Image (spheres, rainbow, N blue to C red):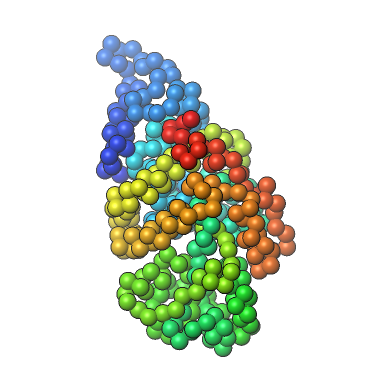
Amino acid sequence: MAIVSTRRARHIGAGALALAALTASLTACSASDSNGSDAAEGDVPDGVLVDASTCERNRDAGTIVYVSGYGYSASAGQMDVFLADDLGYFEALCLDVEINASGANGQQLVGSGQAQFTALGSASDVVLAAANNDNLVAVATYGTEPPFSIFANEKIESLKDLEGGSLGYFINLTPIASAMLDAADVDSSEVDMIKMTNYDPTVVTRGQVDAIVGYASNQPQTLRAMDESFTEFLPADVGVSGTYNVMEANGEFLREHPEAAADFMRASLHALQYCLDEEDDCLDTLAEMAKDANQGDAFPREQLARTWAVESEWVRNSAGGNPGVHTHAMWEPELEIVAKYGDISEIPALEDMMDVDLVADLYDGDELAWPAS
């Protein structure tokens, strides 16, 4: 598996100072001191924010591979991992993290044990994946606003108008979209469903398809920036609820290294808070990282800003409260949707698909314990 590391020479603020100190100390610890004796076993390098036993425990977990299935998107559960790496937060907890940002199928790699973490777009995606692999465990959900929308040519004034027309979708017609059509009393057999390979949203405004199931924070925002006229239908408009972005972990890794898994999430959530508080710096860094990885054209700074302007509000307004915290109750409405529209024979039990304590236990009230409580 090709691993794309995001380690760069530039870091930001206090994270830069910590990383510089950490790098120097790691070098010093691997060599002899000025008197020719080896550095004392169990010493914690400068810049590391945990004690020696915790540092050793996290190192013993080995390399943690995170897969970004959506490249350098400004999305929770993705950009925070990039920033945690860039700011030195993983190193501060003695975690060895590598990032695969090639847009590979993260859930397959995580489920097979070739990677340890990946983010998916909603609980629906997790349930569909978990139905075929019992080695996937959701450890964080970042919002209770479904990320999908149906955006259409302006001649489409209601979802019912899609009857006799065409609706595009990417990869699969998400159960949330099916629920939206059903809630709007659309006869789906009268809609020409087209699998899309072109992510250009102007195919809708140019009339090549009547509508597309897309991400509310992405394609519709691009059309707005272009001052294009179109119609958008959100799940909430027709009473459909769901979730936004889920972090999944390899179940075996989670069982064998629960503390290291918790610290991976601790560092990521610490970076997520940084991105909520320091949006411009965070987006500048992410855009530069995409450019350095030859993905700058796919993730320009202005697009990242449009995406984060929407998705950051989903994080802030999550019914889970603190970022990443999730409960069974948050997932239950979407489970009903997947059971009805997901075309799977059996829904795994929530207790088998979710760990609701890992992230919740990282918080002391409303504050993330950093580096630990």
Would residue 273 be found to the left or right of residue 121 on screen? left
Relative image position of residue 300 (x, y in whole percent): 31, 62
Q: Residue furthest front?
A: 365
Image side of residue 210 versus residue 173, left or right: left
Q: Position of residue 323 (x, y in %)?
A: 48, 47
Q: Quadrant of residue 46?
A: top left
- Counting from the top left corner in percent of width and height, residue 139 is at 56, 46
Against 199, residue 252 (above or below) is above
Above-or-below relation of 350 to 19: below
Residue shown at 51% from the left, 28% from the top: 57
Viewer-proximal residue among 41 and 208: 208
Q: Residue furthest right?
A: 345
> Residue 179 placed where, x, y %?
61, 71
Confirm whether residue 318 shows in the render. yes
| Residue at x 46%, y 35% (from the top left corner) | 369
Farthest bottom residue in view: 164
Return the residue nearer the eye: 245 or 257. Answer: 245
Inspect this view and state whether residue 289 appears: no
Q: Residue at x 45, y 43 (%)?
A: 269
Residue at the image position 35 percent from the left and 47 percent from the top: 277
On screen, 181 above or below 30? below
Residue 201 image-quadrant placement: bottom left
